Image (tube, helix red, strand yellow):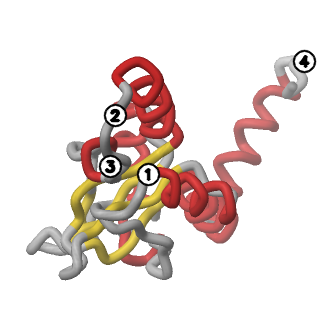
């Protein structure tokens, strides 16, 4: 059942993370090298501080151009208040969070605010697809639905 799958079961825990004191240009290089759209920023104790994303890069480019920034330190350019979830958050709540927040990834935090993993939209899609594929009731429901369509002379698109 979809509502019983938790973030702990779906999350990726081997993450590329960034340090708040690193140079913004080095952080951009990390995103480009690893072909990722963003990465969590954590302090030396693995406490989650925010996300540095493609959007953050755009902010840096504009600020560097218009304000002639004296510093390239990463911390001022991170999103420090993105949506987060805990390891016990269920799949349906995670899916709703993705819809409400329009983000690409959700950091998974423990009760002390430490980053323990991350979930992407594709992780949710993969988990839901696997669960739906292995649930006999879903096959029966899908079959009944398709049978009803064909009886009414309709074709699924």
Sequence-first tag of 2 and 3 = 2
Q: Is residue 138 above or below residue 148?
A: below
Q: Could you give the CA–CA distance between mark 1 and mark 4, rounded to whole angstroms?
A: 60 Å
- Answer with mark 4 or mark 3, whichever residue precedes in sequence: 3
For label 1, the residue is 24
Residue 52 in the image: above or below residue 62: below
Residue 69 image label: 2
Q: What SS does tag 1 mark?
A: helix
| Number of the label disc, if any, that sits on residue 71 | none
Label 1 crowding class (10 Å Cα cut-off): few <14, some 14-19, many 20+?
Answer: many
**First in sequence: mark 4 or mark 2?**
2
Q: Secondary structure at mark 3?
A: helix
Marks 1 and 4: CB-CB under 8 Å?
no
Q: Nearer the viewer, mark 1 or mark 3?
A: 1
Cα separation, mark 1 vs mark 3, equals 33 Å
Q: Which mark is residue 153?
A: 4
Q: Residue at x 51, y 60 (%)?
A: 26
Residue 58: image x %, image y %? 50, 31
Name the image quarter holding residue 147.
top right
x, y percent for residue 129: 65, 59
Question: Which numbered mark, 2 or 3, is in the foreground of this view?
Answer: 2
Viewer-side residue, 70 vs 110: 70
Name which of mark 1 and mark 3 comes first in the sequence: 1
Which tag, 1 or 4, sits closer to the chain's start? 1
């Amino acid at each position: 059942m979809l509502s019983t799958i938790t973030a702990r079961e779906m999350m990726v825990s081997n993450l590329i993370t960034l340090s708040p004191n690193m140079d913004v240009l080095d952080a951009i290089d990390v995103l480009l090298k690893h072909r990722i759209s963003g990465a969590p920023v954590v302090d030396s104790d693995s406490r989650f501080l925010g996300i540095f994303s493609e959007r953050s890069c755009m902010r840096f480019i504009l600020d560097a151009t218009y304000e002639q920034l004296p510093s390239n330190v990463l911390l001022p350019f991170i999103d420090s208040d993105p949506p987060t979830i805990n390891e016990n958050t269920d799949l349906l709540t995670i899916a709703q969070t993705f819809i409400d927040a329009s983000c690409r990834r959700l950091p998974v935090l423990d009760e002390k605010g430490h980053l323990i993993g991350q979930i992407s939209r594709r992780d949710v899609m993969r988990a839901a697809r696997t669960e739906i594929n292995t649930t006999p009731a879903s096959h029966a429901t899908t079959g009944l639905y398709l049978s009803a369509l064909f009886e009414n002379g309709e074709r699924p698109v």
